[in-house]
Image: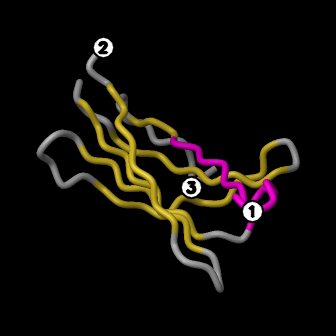
Amino acid sequence: MHGGIPKGPHEYHFVAAVFDAANGARVSDAVVTAEVAGLGLSGSKKKLEPMQIAGTTTYGGFFDLPGFDLYTVKLTVERSGASAAALQFKYDHRR
């Protein structure tokens, strides 16, 4: 999976399931990128790889979260013939 499981102690696996808002169908033909950054840091950006889980497509990748921080996660979903969609949320990794 994604070239193997990283050996670092702070590696976290991010998984995104993408659905079409118009009909609720699972999307399996998207390009999904994730950008993860701690407070005041530039962070890292990666293309999430398609994965098969229980016969459905999800997208995933590993990110290094080295410290207790409030991370911003931005996901961008692109499909041929459609506008890109983006969402952003916070992940509290301070506990």
Give the residue at x 60% y 48%. Answer: 16
- SS at circle 2: loop
Prevailing SS of the magenta stretch? loop
Give the residue at x 75% y 62%. Answer: 22
The amino acid type, in three-letter code, at marker 3 is Gly
In the image as oriented, which residue stretches furthest toward the bottom?
A: 81
The amino acid type, in three-letter code, at marker 1 is Ala
Point out the frontmost of discs 3 and 2. 2
Q: Which residues are magenta?
A: 14-28
Q: Position of residue 27 (x, y in %)?
A: 74, 62
Q: Which residue is mark 1?
A: 22
Residue 3 numbered mark, or none: 3
Measure the C-alpha gap from mark 1 to mark 2.
38 Å
Magenta span includes 7: no
Residue 95 numbered mark, or none: 2
Point out the frontmost of discs 3 and 1. 1
Label 2 near label 3: C-beta < 8 Å? no
Q: Is residue 43 left or right of residue 85?
A: left
Q: Is residue 67 left or right of residue 93?
A: left
Q: Return the disc, 3 or 2, that comes first in the chain's sequence.
A: 3
Q: Quadrant of the C terminus?
A: top left
- SS at circle 1: loop
Please identify the quarter of the rendering in which residue 3 is found. Answer: bottom right
Q: Is residue 72 above or below residue 82?
A: above
